[in-house]
Image (tube, rainbow, N blue to C red):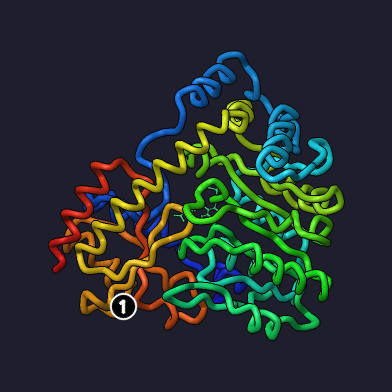
Amino acid sequence: MGTRPLLNRRLAGMGTTIFAEMSALATATGSINLGQGFPDTDGPEEVREAAVRALREGRGNQYPPGPGIPELRTAIAEHQQRFYGLTYDPDTEVLVTAGATEAIAATLLALLEPGDEVIAFEPFYDSYAACIAMAGAFRVPLTLRAPSFRPDLDELRTLITPRTRLLLINTPHNPTGLVLTPAELAAIAQLAVEHDLLVVVDEVYEHLVFSGAHHPIAALPGMRERTVSISSAGKTFSFTGWKVGWVTANSALVSAVRTAKQYLTYVSAGPFQYAVAEALRLPDGYFERFRADLLHKRGLLSDGLSAAGFGVFPPEGTYFITTDITPLGEKDGVEFCRALPQRCGVVAIPNAVFYDNTEAGQSLVRFTFCKKDSTLQEAADRLRRLR
Ligand code: PMP
Ligand code: GLN
């Protein structure tokens, strides 16, 4: 095959995702996995039953419509109306995808030209860097720094160049737990309008906000026509393996994203689409209990991590806690996470892998709290052995 590397240069260095690496390490060592964000209990029984019913009744067992089944597109539009007062036409302004991951990929592949610049908050969710690279574009990081992780919006302004095409934001933010305030969103929206930029917003943790509320940037003046909003059923309904996600945007943007999406998977997960349509229509009480339950778990893990000697940055949203390992006399999160399973039987994720400016995340480590109370308790007991 000659000397040319097999993996193309856009993907060179991307390797295996940190989530795959750390989950494999958890399995190999029998450790408690507080790395990859997936719950250790399934979501609502009635939603699981809805999937079983769809399978048995032969709904979605053959290719569903490319943009998603109409029942789900309608349920997504109703959800946007019910929680945010946003109106989308289920036929032209909603697209169902294979998880938020495919929504991100299709959006970036559809909207970017090679050479475009994308400004994104770092630490970035890992697929952002890969998808920007696959589109031949360049990422320009706005670094979120401990302890507050609030974005410096004056700095954001200085990062905009004539090549900037798109702002890629994530609120609530994985891994820091930052939730953008209405004032921050308004400032970002104003820059987008002023510089005629597209905005892609990843809102997969929209129902996990513990202080304040989730505000969709698409609702702000001038934003509807330039915003692609992305979410997913995985986190909200605790079925991360189902991989049902969606895009809402105006019809021109949805049409562009659909063009890319149809050649990635064409469609996904027929029966699960019926189940997620039911899930999105669950009463408000479901969403309130889900949030309250995770808030309780945040407290458990946060206390456990503090007792074990970590510096804890309480997240405003998501189901992750970012910690500082320097109080434990440690400096390097990657080394720390690779050794942690052997040292005490717990797996975590080093935030450094989500930064270009790795020094800003070098001593930061992320733990998830979307686990049974007993799992979190046991993890806390094990982590105390580090002292
Ligand atoms: N964006 C963020 C910020 C995430 O944390 C995740 C992981 N759930 C995704 C996107 C991917 O979501 P999905 O599993 O629906 O593809
Ligand atoms: N979103 C999950 C996390 O941040 C991981 C999903 C994945 O493995 N791609 O932990």
Left or right of 310? Residue 164 is right
| In-front residue for pair 345/307 | 307
Kind of residue indicated by mark 1: Asp
Badge 1 element: loop
Q: Is mark 1 within 8 Å of ligand 2?
A: no
Query: Which residue is tagged 1?
Result: 332
- What residue sits 72% from the left and 30% below the top? 69
Q: Residue furthest top?
A: 57
Q: Is residue 296 above or below residue 41?
A: below
Q: Residue furthest right?
A: 252
Crowd class of label 1 (few under 14; some 14 to 19; many from 20; radius 10 Å): some
| In-front residue for pair 61/367 | 367
- What residue sits 48% from the left and 77% below the top? 145
Residue 303, x across and y down, in percent: 26, 57
Q: Residue furthest bottom?
A: 158
| In-front residue for pair 323/42 | 323
Q: Is residue 50 visible?
A: yes
- What residue sits 26% from the left and 50% below the top? 32
Residue 335 quadrant:
bottom left
- What residue sits 37% from the left and 59% below the top? 21
Left or right of 159? Residue 42 is left
Residue 16, x across and y down, in percent: 45, 62
Left or right of 37? Residue 222 is right
Q: How many marks?
A: 1
> In which quadrant is the C terminus drawn?
bottom left
Q: Is residue 270 visible?
A: no
Residue 182, x across and y down, in percent: 65, 62
Residue 127, x across and y down, in percent: 56, 61
> In which quadrant is the N terminus drawn?
bottom right
| In-front residue for pair 191/360 | 191
